[in-house]
Image (spheres, rainbow, N blue to C red):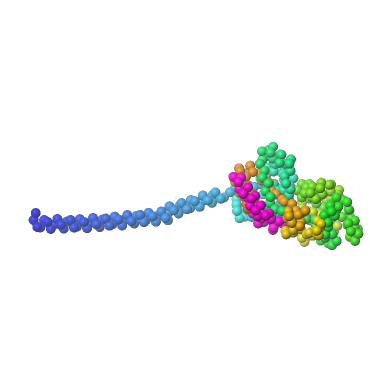
Amino acid sequence: MSKFKIMLLALIAILTIGVLAACGSDSEEETDNNEEANASETDDGSDETEDTSTEEDSEVSDELEGTVAIDGSGTVYPLMSKLAEEYMVNEQPNVSVEVSRAGTSAGFEKFLAEDGTDFNDASRPIKEEEQAKADELGIEVMEIKTALDGLTIVINPENDWAKELTAEQVEDIFLGNVTKWSEIDSEWPDEEIQTYGPNENHGTYEFFYEVILEEQDLVDSIDLQQEYSTLVTLVSEDKNAIGYFGFGYYDNNQDQVQAVGIDFGDGAVVPSLETIGEEGPYADYTRPVFTYLNVNNAQEKPEVYDYAVYVGESINEFAGETGFAPLPDDEQQAQLEEIQAIQ
């Protein structure tokens, strides 16, 4: 081979290597760019899509619709009404929580029925015959203790003589053993005592009759009313009036009625959030209040279950402002776990 040919082949080889090197570099750069672009697209695109999908799924799963039907105790009504309002505003705006107040016994009639209410508020425990009806209908019932209430004896604001009474004097008044104030104390007015209270639809009536009066008949002249607001008005307009209802109705109407301090044997105790309690100084007139849940409905309708959990979580937060003493924290937590175990 001539020296010229050898030089020519060497030059071609050098050029070929250069071209290949350049192509390889471009290819690697392109590959790197593509991978980077793909990575960028993945981070900014597919990941975002995945996040959005998860968020949307979460929003969908968190959003509930439907109606929760509650009836029952007028005493428990302020607490359950407040819970319903907070739930609809801050938790599930597409769920309508409808709270009525037919009274404990009347409410149980609506609760223990086919297609009955989801909850029944009660100012007394469920009765044996009511539980038997639930069993007959196949309705599983869960008792949820919501708060503690203090039965409050109220008088007219102008009554400046009976601000303190013994428990025995209260019984004498509502049994009709005394009919005039002067029969309790000769220095008190020689005027007829006018008695007022909630009617038989209310658990408060039953608590007063069964626990306070030990099932002795109330005085015949007592004026029994369905609406607590009516009782407040009647007592506020009658100087010789004396009535009873839950602490919350007194607490919200202190400009119209005054509470009587009750002497259970150790001096008069005025009901308050501090004295009301099952172990407190007002224990003799303290009672737990409840709402009863239709467990079948909670298992079938997510909105009913969700509201039941909300009640279990939030009752103590709103008890005080609606006139009830809260439950001990460990009791509330144990009850919440029982509700959560439904599903």
Closer to the camera in the image, 55 or 148: 148
Closer to the camera in the image, 226 or 148: 148
**Residue 71, how many percent across, how many down?**
70, 47
Residue shown at the point (76%, 56%) measured from the top left: 282
**Residue 70, how many percent across, how many down?**
68, 47
Q: How many marks?
A: 0
Can residue 246 be seen?
no
Rendered image quadrant of residue 342 = top right
Quadrant position of the N terminus in the picture: bottom left
Is residue 316 part of the magenta span, yes or no? yes
Q: Main secondary structure of the magenta part?
A: helix
**Residue 63, how many percent across, how many down?**
57, 50
Residue shown at the point (77%, 53%) measured from the top left: 284
Outermost residue toward the top? Answer: 136
Rendered image quadrant of residue 237 = bottom right
| For residue 136, side relative to residue 214 (left or right) | left
Is residue 27 part of the magenta span, yes or no? no
Residue shown at the point (80%, 58%) measured from the top left: 266
Quadrant position of the C terminus in the picture: top right
Rendered image quadrant of residue 257 = bottom right
Residue shown at the point (69%, 43%) measured from the top left: 111
Can residue 144 be seen?
yes
Closer to the camera in the image, 64 or 119: 119
**Residue 203, how many percent across, how many down?**
75, 48
The magenta region covers 314-343
